[in-house]
Image (cartoon, rainbow, N blue to C red):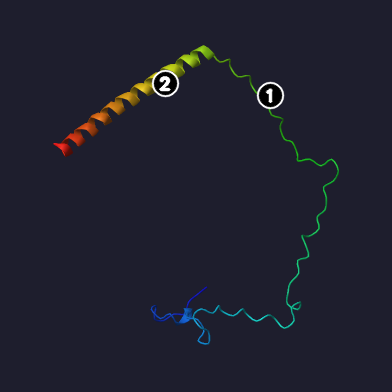
Amino acid sequence: MTTPSGDPTDHEYWRRPADLEPGQPAPRPAAPADPGADVPTYAGPPPTTPATTGWRPPTVVNPAAPRELPPQNQESIDADERGARTLTYGIAMVGGAVLLIVICLLCSRVLF
């Protein structure tokens, strides 16, 4: 939608028609004289031809069978996870202690 050019502060383009009161809704646009004359109809999608029986896309090379994954050492994985959890908890406790000290210092500056 475009607006007429000219003074940008002029709101004449957006004003309600003069014959309507402020609380009255705008009138609906007039319906066409012959409702079925200009209405396009949808004929549906174009017809398609089915593929021949047994059609498949061409196969160039058959892929190789997947390799077998190496076995996993569950005990070692569990030990590494325990160590990582301990390290994470340690870092969180040190960070919490530093944060607690900073909060205590800020509160002491406000109170004293």
Q: Could you say where residue 44 lies in the image, as x and y percent from the top left? A: 77, 62
Q: Is residue 26 above or below residue 73?
A: below
Report the side of 53 relative to 20 (left or right): right
Q: Could you say where residue 51 lies in the image, as x and y percent from the top left? A: 82, 47
Q: Using the image, tell me which numbered label, if any, was put on residue 105.
A: none
**Can you identify the residue that label 1 sits on?**
65
Asked where in the image residue 109 lies, by quadrant, the reply is top left
Quarter of the image that includes the C terminus: top left
Residue flagged by tag 2: what amino acid is it?
A: Arg
**Can you identify the residue that label 2 sits on?**
85
Is residue 73 visible in the rendered image? The answer is: no
Q: Are marks 2 and 1 in contact (CB under 8 Å)?
A: no
Of the pair 87 and 26, the residue shown nearer to us: 26
Q: Nearer the viewer, mark 2 or mark 1?
A: 2
**Going by the picture, which residue comes out furthest to the bottom?**
19
Report the side of 106 relative to 41 (left or right): left
Of the pair 17 and 76, the residue shown nearer to us: 17
Point out the tag, 2 or 1, that comes first from the N-terminus. 1
Label 2: which secondary element: helix
Of the pair 112 and 1, the residue shown nearer to us: 112
Report the side of 107 relative to 31 (left or right): left
What residue lies at 49% left-to-right and 80% top-to-bottom?
22
Q: Is residue 30 above or below residue 62?
A: below
Say few, some or many: other residues with alpha carbon within 10 Å of mark 1 (under 14 / 14 to 19 / 20 or more). few
What residue lies at 75% left-to-right and 81% top-to-bottom?
34
**Going by the picture, which residue comes out furthest to the left?**
112
